[in-house]
Image (cartoon, rainbow, N blue to C red):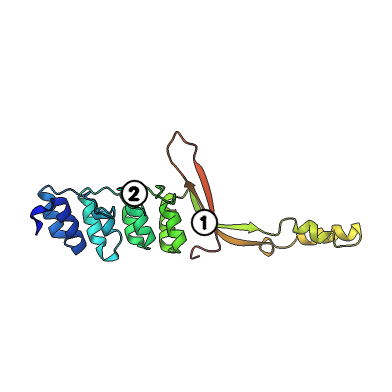
Amino acid sequence: MGQHQSKGELLYQEVNHGNIEGIKALRREGAGLEWVDKEGKTPLIVACMNPQLFNVAETLIELGANVNAYPGSHVGTPLHHAAERGLDQTVKLLLSHGANALAMNDDCQTPLEVARSKGHINVVRAIEGHLCFFSGWMREIYGSGILETLATHFLSRKMRERGREFLEALPPQWLSRKIWVVVLPCGSRKTAIPIKLEVAVYSSPQV
């Protein structure tokens, strides 16, 4: 059956079967790791689409598979595929081996944007944690102009002043709320291009 198949294609098939020893044996025989199927998927992309193939993905990376391969699959790189499916452990594996978290797919989405659109919180936090310049709790002052607006409801100037003094004396937490803030780059990180920053605001790290 395999006499007309390349070693790279045979290795790809072993990935589908989860056969790590078969993958290693074919690699020793010179099989390539970047064979592409008709849907534009490399062996690593296939492994990054299935939570049961995490160990296979790890093996392929150890053998030298390209973590930033983008052979034409519409969804993008291995990181895009893992992010789309909410595979946070696979995402962390790819990031730890140099996967580009700012790469864009055909829809001009980064893996982070893909994970957000799918609601995969653990993946979002993993990518943000890898990229961010800052993450933590802050206080948001809400109701801009609230002191002035409320104070003008007092009839006399003296009462307006007393009202303003009263509002300014309120504890800060009465006029603010805790928010989870993440500051991270967006777009290219090439030194020739000025860096752009995104400020992501959440009600909590779990949202």
Task: Using the numbered discs, state the Cα–Cα distance from disc 1 to disc 2 in whole angstroms.
Answer: 24 Å
Q: Which of the 4 quarters of the picture holds residue 148?
A: bottom right
Q: Left of 101 or right of it: where is 143?
A: right
Which residue in the protein does label 1 denote?
136
Badge 2 amino acid: Ala
Q: Secondary structure at mark 2?
A: loop
Q: Position of residue 95 (x, y in %)?
A: 34, 52
Q: Position of residue 8 (x, y in %)?
A: 16, 51
**Is residue 165 at all visible to an observer of this figure?**
no
Q: Left of 34 or right of it: where is 171?
A: right
Q: Position of residue 152 (x, y in %)?
A: 84, 59
Give the foreground label among 1 and 2. Answer: 2
Above or below: residue 150 compared with residue 184: below
Residue in the image at 23% along x and 61% along y: 55
Mark 1 vs 2, N-terminal side? 2
Which residue in the protein does label 2 denote?
99
**Is residue 155 at all visible to an observer of this figure?**
yes
* Label 1, residues with CA under 10 Å away: few <14, some 14-19, many ≥20: few
Residue in the image at 18% along x and 59% along y: 13
Q: Left of 187 or right of it: where is 40?
A: left
Badge 1 amino acid: Gly
Q: Which of the 4 quarters of the picture holds residue 162?
A: bottom right
The residue most toward the right is 156
Residue in the image at 36% along x and 61% along y: 88
Q: Which mark is residue 183?
A: none
Residue in the image at 35% along x and 62% along y: 87
Q: Position of residue 3 (x, y in %)?
A: 7, 54
Task: Report the front residue among 144 and 39.
Answer: 39
Q: Secondary structure at mark 1?
A: strand
